[in-house]
Image (cartoon, rainbow, N blue to C red):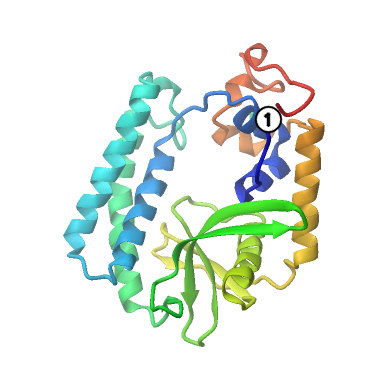
């Protein structure tokens, strides 16, 4: 299989644990489900729908939409993995309790997002045609390596400055802001201006973190990281990195360092 493009998710996974990258993206080992994925996806769907409709919807409809979307995603994963004991959860919680809890918690986060957005003096930026910049698709050519993805939102702060915003439903901020740094370059290619700032909206707090200065994410640096990723993958360099990340690793069963079923997906010399 020829890899046609790279993504922020690939760079992030490869830099944290090469073995996880190999199992997820090269060997395609089946990952364990987790309700937190569906909470995040359903939240994004609803936030986008509400903003795309210029916040015209009745709030109750948005909460219904969240629950419908969450239930649909959970049901699809239940078919794939009916054994709830294999589902990952946050802590010692049973999967069925975790699913029920996240169904409620995600709806609260949707309500929190709408309350926040209506009170904030910033807004989703609109392009020259007046369309809100949501789930903005990009294809970034970094000196021969194509990086593709979607930016959750371009946010316009009250100062008039505009930058990328990513919506997070998890509890932790990323250790590395490279995601926002890549979006910065994508925005320059798409719209002709290079943002200085970017931020994360943290649904657990119903508000964004303070904006981060993204100026260290230059095109030269980001290009080098993606070329290093590309070269590493093509060379089959996939080192495991056991540590905190193993707790939320969906392919840990098959990991050559700590998994009990590692023989089912043995390391291969090169990406195929
Ligand atoms: S279990 Fe840990 S070391 Fe193994 S692939 Fe997952 S994150 Fe990497």
Q: Residues within 10 Å of mark 1 (few under 14, many from 20)?
A: many
Q: How far from the left and from the top, in percent, is residue 217?
A: 72, 66
Q: How far from the left and from the top, in percent, is residue 74?
A: 33, 34
Query: Is 80 in front, or is 145?
Result: 145
| Ligand 1 within 8 Å, label 1 CB | no
Quarter of the rendering containing residue 182: bottom right
As displayed, is residue 156 above or below residue 115? below
Residue drawn at 54 percent across, 83 percent down: 161
Query: Is 23 in front, or is 36?
Result: 23
- Ligand 1 resides in the quarter of the picture at top right
As displayed, is residue 70 above or below residue 84? below
Q: What residue sits right under mark 1 in the picture?
A: 22
Query: Is residue 262 shown to the viewer in this render?
Result: yes
Horizontal side of 126 relative to 15 (left or right) equals left
Q: How far from the left and from the top, in percent, is residue 198?
A: 58, 70
Horizontal side of 157 relative to 262 (left or right) equals left
Residue drawn at 39 percent across, 23 percent down: 80
Query: Is residue 212 shown to the viewer in this render?
Result: no
Query: Is 130 in front, or is 19?
Result: 130
Residue drawn at 72 percent across, 44 percent down: 15
């Amino acid at each position: 299989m020829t890899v046609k493009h790279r993504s922020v998710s690939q760079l992030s996974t490869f830099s944290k644990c090469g073995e996880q990258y190999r199992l997820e993206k090269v060997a395609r080992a089946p990952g364990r489900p987790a309700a937190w994925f569906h909470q995040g996806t359903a939240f994004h769907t609803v936030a986008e729908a509400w903003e795309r409709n210029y916040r015209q919807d009745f709030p109750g409809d948005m909460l219904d939409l969240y629950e419908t979307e969450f239930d649909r995603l959970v049901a699809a994963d239940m078919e794939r993995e009916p054994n709830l004991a294999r589902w990952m959860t946050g802590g010692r919680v049973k999967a069925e309790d975790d699913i029920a809890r996240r169904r409620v918690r995600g709806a609260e986060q949707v309500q929190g997002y709408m309350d926040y957005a209506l009170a904030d003096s910033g807004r989703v930026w609109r392009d020259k045609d007046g369309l809100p910049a949501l789930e903005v698709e990009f294809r970034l050519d970094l000196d021969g390596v194509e990086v593709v993805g979607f930016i959750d939102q371009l946010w316009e702060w009250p100062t008039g400055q505009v930058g990328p915003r990513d919506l997070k439903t998890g509890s932790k901020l990323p250790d590395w802001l490279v995601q926002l740094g890549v979006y910065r370059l994508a925005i320059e290619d798409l719209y002709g201006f290079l943002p200085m700032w970017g931020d994360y909206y943290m649904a657990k707090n119903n508000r964004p973190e303070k904006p981060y200065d993204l100026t260290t994410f230059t095109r030269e640096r980001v290009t080098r990281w993606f070329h290093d990723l590309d070269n590493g993958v093509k060379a089959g360099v996939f080192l495991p990195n056991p540590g905190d990340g193993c707790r939320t690793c969906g392919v840990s069963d098959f990991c050559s360092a700590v998994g009990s079923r590692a023989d089912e997906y043995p390391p291969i010399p090169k990406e195929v």
